[in-house]
Amino acid sequence: MDRLERFYKIDQLLKERQVVSFALFREKLGMSRASVKRDLEYMRERFNAPIEYDRGVNGYRFGKPRSGPRYELPGLWFNAAEIHALLSTLQLLSGLQPGLLDGQVSPVIERLRAILGSGDHSWEEVARRIRIFQPERRAGKAAHFSVIAAALLKRTRVWIRHYNRKDDRETEREISPQRLVHYRDNWYVDGYCHLREDLRSFAVDAIREAELREARAKEIPAAQLDEHLGSGYGIFAGRDVQWAELRFTSEAARWVSAQLWHPKQRARVEADGSYVLEIPYAHERELVMEILKFGAEVEVVAPSSLRERVAGDLKRAAGRYG
């Protein structure tokens, strides 16, 4: 164990156990008494670590922050969520087409690079060693996104020509955009459709044309939006919500149990190790696609309509192989 690794180990022990005896430090670090003392003193002097010895509990703990520089160890100062956010933002900004933000994007990119390189490694090394892949991202026209965003913020209606992939046809709609949603690396606009006189979600990448209208947008309360578009599974939400019960094998459970499919999901582990997941959904299309990803590792228990749909899709898939 090298010295920097020992410092991280000391930091981890103090954070996890609150109080650490000298004997435990020696045991975990595999070092002599003198070496442990040197490391603790070095952390106090060089990193301003607020490490204190508490005679009452006969151990070391983190005390109140000391005056001077903030205590931190050298290295990459990001957790998993922060590094994902920073690299994703950098990737999105670097891929922007010329447009409204031409004069503002470069300084932001440089600032992000400076933040990424604020530890012991350059931002180039961070970007080279840590990758963000977006396999489900669909490309759309930046101009259409800009029109939708402008209508959303100006609170005006927008006319769109939208391609329905399921029916392989285009329709023209006038909508009052309510919010933009980034879901699974793709953008959707939640809006009030004046043709259907109801709330709908439209994939921005499927918009073929978009034009601003002068008419004021119809305002929908946030609670109504959440009830209609946020209650079911994924982007295909709605008012008439059903609950799907899925049983995954014990092997698949190792992955599925770590995933959040829906904020309101319910789950339990059965005696045989299988994992039962219950999630709400309003339209089954996207849910079926997710279920089929797991093949023979999942069974739809309920409702019967969803079970029959998945069984039928699997039979048709098997039929392609003779």
Image (cartoon, rainbow, N blue to C red):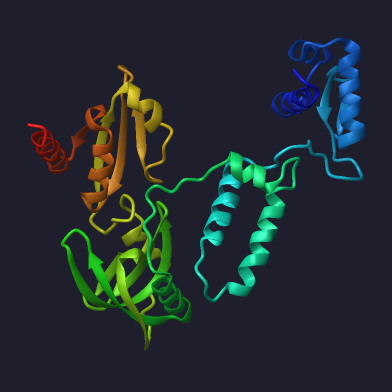
Q: Is residue 128 above or below residue 106?
A: above
For residue 318, side relative to residue 298 (left or right): left
144 over 231 or under it: above or below: below
Tell me the quarter of the image containing the N terminus: top right
Q: Residue furthest bottom?
A: 214
**303 left or right, relative to 148:** left
Left or right relative to 76: residue 204? left
Instruction: Name the image quarter holding the C terminus.
Output: top left
Q: Residue at x 51, y 45 (%)?
A: 132
Q: Position of residue 139 (x, y in %)?
A: 38, 60
Q: Position of residue 209 (x, y in %)?
A: 31, 76
Nearer to the camera, 227 or 305: 305
Q: Nearer the viewer, residue 48 or 123?
A: 123
Up-down relation of residue 302 to residue 231 (above or below): above
Residue at (66% x, 47% y) in the render:
124
Residue 97 higher or lower than 67, as above or below: below
Image coordinates of residue 197 in percent, x first then y, are 24, 75
The residue located at (31%, 34%) in the rendering is: 277
233 lies left or right of 299: right
**Residue 23: horizontal and vertical position, in percent?**
81, 11
Residue 177 occupies quadrant: bottom left
Q: Can residue 224 be seen in this snapshot?
A: no
